[in-house]
């Protein structure tokens, strides 16, 4: 049964509290030289929901992912997962706790087969310990369990026919699927996807979308970075917007697209354009068409187009 209760407690403002958060982050900062890449005062990620993390290029989205999952060290801050502090915890320990992530540039082991990649993702493997590696009787049973689990996931992701192929032979979209499938080997509670649609053939896009929705249906929480606003609008329950390292807006997709702070974050030099007026919208479209490559980039231009369409629909 679908839970129709509000996700946030109170108003949908930046850093608002959630009814049932799985991740809570406070005062998380990360700077590179004189640049504040991340400056998150407070953020909660709702449990059993699909949350999209969006923002202009360079907003700090991937850096925040790296900090939360132990792949980078913040200057300040603390954060919890399932009520347990994971500040300073190694990335592999974070994954074992049930918080896993994928990468914008896939991290599959190209010289290993698809099945070998899947086995690497599993936890609790006695054979990894040198003292037990020579005794197959100790770890053989667990390896059979891992292999059986991998077979089930590969069939679900339609990669079972590729199980004996080297991962390097897979297409970009298939590597995304493999990385997502491998992350499920630890039976995670939170799956974090960094631009899951980047570089994916359109033929595999719907498959990836279905798999992401299935993660939620199976009781997992999803947090993903994405520039495709059509995807965000159709599968996200909640949207968090970052700009210049800060959280500038939160809320349901339709509400966020109308938020002045979001419009300002994406428009930059175009902030003086009146989006409430038909002529203002046409003016913005003309300006974006002229400089989308040199100023906002094609990814940000896609989100801007969605903002414009939302404004037009709401008139």
Image (cartoon, rainbow, N blue to C red):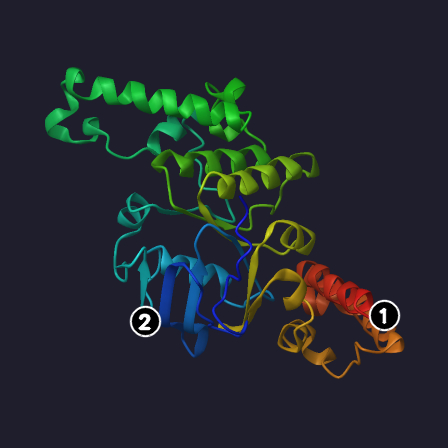
Q: Are marks 1 and 2 in contact (CB under 8 Å)?
A: no
Above or below residue 101? Residue 306 is below
Which residue is located at x 81 percent, y 64 percent?
313
Residue 143 figure quarter = top left
Q: Nearer the viewer, residue 258 or 175?
A: 258
Above or below residue 145? Residue 66 is below
In the rendered image, which quarter contains the C terminus?
bottom right
Q: Which residue matches tag 1?
A: 286
Horizontal relation, residue 145 to residue 280: left or right = left
The image shows residue 173 at horizontal and vertical percentages of: 59, 36
Q: Which residue matches tag 2?
A: 77
Q: Please, what secondary structure does the residue beneath circle 1 have? A: helix
C-alpha distance separating marks 1 and 2: 42 Å
Marked residue nearer the N-terminal end (1 or 2): 2
Horizontal relation, residue 176 to residue 87: left or right = right
The circle on residue 216 is none
The image shows residue 84 at horizontal and vertical percentages of: 26, 58
Residue 136 figure quarter = top left
Crowd rating for badge 1 (residues with CA inside 10 Å; few <14, some 14–19, many 20+): few
Which residue is located at x 44 percent, y 69 percent?
17
The image shows residue 188 at horizontal and vertical percentages of: 37, 42
Can residue 113 be seen here?
no
The image shows residue 40 at horizontal and vertical percentages of: 43, 72
Can residue 9 be seen here?
yes
Which residue is located at x 44 percent, y 36 percent?
108
Above or below residue 145? Residue 181 is below
């Amino acid at each position: 049964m679908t839970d129709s209760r509000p996700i946030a407690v109170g108003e949908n403002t930046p850093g608002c509290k959630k009814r049932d958060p799985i991740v809570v982050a406070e005062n998380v900062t990360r700077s590179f030289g004189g640049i504040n890449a991340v400056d998150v005062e407070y953020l909660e990620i709702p449990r059993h929901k699909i949350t999209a993390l969006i923002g202009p290029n360079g907003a700090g989205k991937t850096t925040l992912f790296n900090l939360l999952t132990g792949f980078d060290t913040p200057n300040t801050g603390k954060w919890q997962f399932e009520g347990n502090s994971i500040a300073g915890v190694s990335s592999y320990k974070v994954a074992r706790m049930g918080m896993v992530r994928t990468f914008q540039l896939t991290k599959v082991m190209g010289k290993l087969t698809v099945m070998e990649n899947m086995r690497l993702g599993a936890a609790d493997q006695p054979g990894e310990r040198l003292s037990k590696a020579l005794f197959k009787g100790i770890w053989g049973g667990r390896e059979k369990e891992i292999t059986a689990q991998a077979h089930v996931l590969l069939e679900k992701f339609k990669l079972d026919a590729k199980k004996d192929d080297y991962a390097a032979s897979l297409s970009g979209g298939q590597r995304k699927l493999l990385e997502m499938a491998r992350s499920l080997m630890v039976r995670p509670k939170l799956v974090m996807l960094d631009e899951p649609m980047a570089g994916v053939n359109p033929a595999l896009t719907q498959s990836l979308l279905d798999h992401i929705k299935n993660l939620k249906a199976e009781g997992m929480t999803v947090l993903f970075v994405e520039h495709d606003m059509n995807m965000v609008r159709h599968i996200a329950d909640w949207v968090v917007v970052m700009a210049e390292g800060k959280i500038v807006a939160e809320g349901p997709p339709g509400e966020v697209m109308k938020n002045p702070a979001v419009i300002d974050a994406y428009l930059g030099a175009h902030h003086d354009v009146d989006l409430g007026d038909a002529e203002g919208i046409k003016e913005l479209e003309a300006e974006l068409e002229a400089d989308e490559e040199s100023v906002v980039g094609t990814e940000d231009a896609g989100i801007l187009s969605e903002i414009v369409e939302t404004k037009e629909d709401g008139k």
